Amino acid sequence: DLPPLVVDANWPLLIGAGLLVGISTRYGAGCTSGHGVCGLARLAPRSMAATAMFLVTAIATVYVVRHVIGGGV
């Protein structure tokens, strides 16, 4: 048996996050795994830049959540 899935966020936040992911995927001409796996394997400059931005954004998000806001684990 799998444990129950608990999402600790409200509906407007989830809808906003989904819209941002969709818009970003469209604007970035692909998803993170597409750029990170296929694009980097082809040595595509656009995918290299996109993957670098994904990593920088993830690092900044973790920093803000853990050290600025004070949340997280």
Image (cartoon, rainbow, N blue to C red):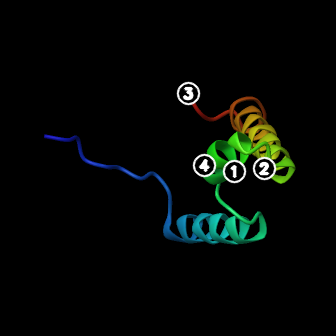
Viewer-side label of 2, 3: 2
| Above-or-below relation of 37 to 9 | above
Disc 1 crowd, CA 10 A, few/some/many (<14, 14-19, 20+): many
Q: Are marks 4 and 1 in contact (CB under 8 Å)?
A: yes
Left or right of 51 on screen, residue 1: left
Q: Are marks 4 and 3 in contact (CB under 8 Å)?
A: no
Q: Which numbered disc flags the more N-terminal residue, 2 or 1?
A: 1
Q: Which residue is mark 1?
A: 35
Q: Which residue does the image show at 75% across and 29% down from the upper left?
A: 67
Front-most of residues 58 and 66: 58
Where residue 24 sits in the image (x, y, percent)? 72, 65
Front-most of residues 73 and 23: 23
The local secondary structure at tag 2 comes to helix
Instruction: Count the labels in the image.
Output: 4
Q: Which numbered disc flags the more N-terminal residue, 4 or 3?
A: 4
Q: Which numbered disc flags the more N-terminal residue, 4 or 2?
A: 4
Amino acid type, label 3? Val
Disc 2 crowd, CA 10 A, few/some/many (<14, 14-19, 20+): many
Q: Which residue is mark 3?
A: 73
Amino acid type, label 2? Ser
Q: Which residue is mark 4?
A: 33
Q: Which residue is mark 2?
A: 47
Amino acid type, label 1? His
